[in-house]
Amino acid sequence: MLVVLLFIVFIPSLSFAHTKVAQTIPANGATLATSPDEIKLIFSDTLKITAMKLLDYQGKELILKHDKAPKALKEKVAIPQTLAAGTYRVIWRGISADGHPIKGQITFTIAP
Ligand SMILES: [Cu+2]
């Protein structure tokens, strides 16, 4: 009986798990000595990024070059403009491999 219940509870959640962020470069909350050459998002499964933005501490959008075609990717690489000392935020939205919309963000700081 317990085994049957475990299957009922766990199998659907495994089959329909959302794509999650596995790693980011820079890491969320990181302090960097210099402006990063690239910003990389690594996901647990494929994700179609539909929007990705780089913002300064005032919420002003900065230049972040990336392929805007919504392809299913496990790694998303974007090239930021050269950043001065300060705190920045990267925000993104996408469609998970299971079809659900997801969004996330990281912040990082460049030391003065
Ligand atoms: Cu999902």
Image (tube, helix red, strand yellow):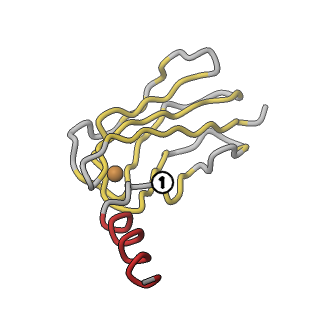
Which image quadrant is residue 36 in? Answer: top right
Residue at point 48% right, 22% down? 62
**Camera-side residue: 95 or 107?**
95
Image label count = 1
What residue occupies the far right of the structure in this picture? 112
Q: Is residue 99 above or below residue 10?
A: above
What residue occupies the far front of the structure in this picture? 1
Residue type highlighted by circle 1: Val
* Relative side of 45 to 60, left or right: left
Q: Is residue 56 above or below residue 28?
A: above
Residue at point 38% right, 63% down? 13
**Quadrant location of the C terminus?**
top right
Question: Could you say where residue 46 lies in the image, as x and y percent from the top left?
Answer: 30, 58
**Camera-side residue: 108 or 15?**
15
* Relative side of 77 to 29, left or right: left
Instruction: Provide the secondary structure element on which disc 1 rests.
Output: strand
**Camera-side residue: 24 or 111?**
24
Question: Could you say where residue 75 lies in the image, as x and y percent from the top left?
Answer: 38, 56
* Relative side of 5 to 72, left or right: right
Residue at point 34% right, 59% down? 74
* Relative side of 102 to 61, left or right: left
Which image quadrant is residue 32 in? Answer: top right
The residue tagged 1 is 21
